[in-house]
Amino acid sequence: MDNFENLQVTTHQIDGGGPVVEIALNRPKVNALSTALLEELLIAAEACSADPPGAVVITGAGRFFAAGAEISEFTDPATREPLLKAFRDAFDAVAGIPCPTIAAVNGLALGGGAELAWCCDYRIAGESTVFGQPEILLGIIPGAGGTQRLARLIGAARAKEIVFEGEQLTAEDAQNAGLVNVVVPDEEILSTAIARAEKLAKGPLLALRAAKTAIDTGIDGALSDGLDLEGEMFDDLFNTNDAATGIATFFEHGPGKATFTGT
C-alpha cells in the first residue's frame, strides 16, 4: 500500500501483536472526498481485508478529518454517478475490514467525512471536533450511509433529527449521542487512537474478528440467525491456540493475563 496520491499509509509494527495500519486522508486543504481519493481508499481497505492487520486507524492529515465530498464532482452530472459508486465501494470496503477499525477524527467531519467515521468500529474525537450531516441544507440528503449507518448506530429518531435539520454536533454532543467513544485534547487524538489500536492488536485477533462479524452480521438480520452465527463462532474459537492459552492462563493466573499469538 504505497504510491497513493491522496492517502498516507503507515504500518506500525507492534511487539507482541499484529501490526496497526494508519490510513490518513491527504487531500489539502480540507480532505474533500473525490473519486480519486475514494478509489485509493478502496484499494487500502481491500488490502486490509485480504491480509488483516491487528487494527486499522483512519484519520485526516492536516487540520481536518474530511469536510465532505468534492462538491464540484457532485454538481456535474457526468461525474456524479462515478463519485456515488466510489463512495459506496470505498465505504462498504472500510466497513467490511475484518479487524477493529478506529476513526481518529480531527477538525471537521461533515457529510461524507462523518459517513466515513460511521463506517468504523470506534470513533475518537478531539475537543474541537465537529460532526455533521448538512446535506439537507443543500436540498439533498446524505448519499454515503448517513441515512443508514447513522440510524443503526443511534436509532432512527435521533438520526432523523440530525439529518432533517442539518445539525452539527460538537464532540461532546456526539459522545452523548453514542457516536463517539472518547473525547480527548485535540493534540492527543491520533496518539490515543494508536494506543487503543495497539491494545486491540495485542488481543486474540481471531476472536476479535469473529466478534465483529457476529455483531455486524447479526444486527441486520433476524435474532435467531444472529444467535446461530454467534454459537457457531463461539464453538469454532475453542479450536484456536488463543482460546487454549486464554483458558489455561485464566485457571493459572486469573483473567486478563494471557499473551495471545493471533492463531
Image: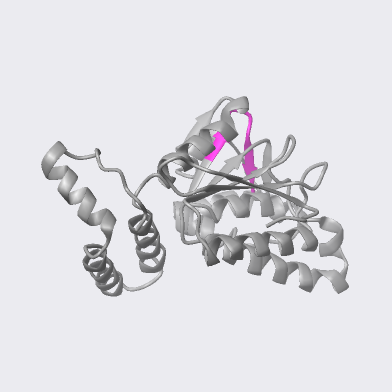
Instruction: Tell me if residue 111 can be seen.
Output: no
Q: Position of residue 60 (x, y in %)?
A: 69, 43
Quarter assignment of residue 42: bottom right
Extent of the magenta region: 124-132
Assess whether residue 126 is covered by the magenta stretch. yes
**Where's the N terminus, which quadrant?**
bottom right
User: Residue at the spot x=39%, y=64% of the render?
Assistant: 213
User: Residue at the spot x=55%, y=50% of the render?
Assistant: 161
Q: Position of residue 145 (x, y in %)?
A: 59, 62
User: Residue at the spot x=44%, y=55% of the render?
Assistant: 155
Q: Position of residue 149 (x, y in %)?
A: 52, 59
Judge from the rendering whether residue 204 lies leftward or rightward of residue 238; answer left or right: right
Relative to the observer, which residue lies in front, 105 or 178?
Answer: 105
Whether residue 219 is situated above or below residue 61 in the rendered picture: below
Instruction: Tell me if residue 255 can be seen.
Output: yes
**Where's the C terminus, which quadrant?**
bottom left
Q: Main secondary structure of the magenta part?
A: strand
Relative to the observer, which residue lies in front, 249 or 7?
Answer: 249
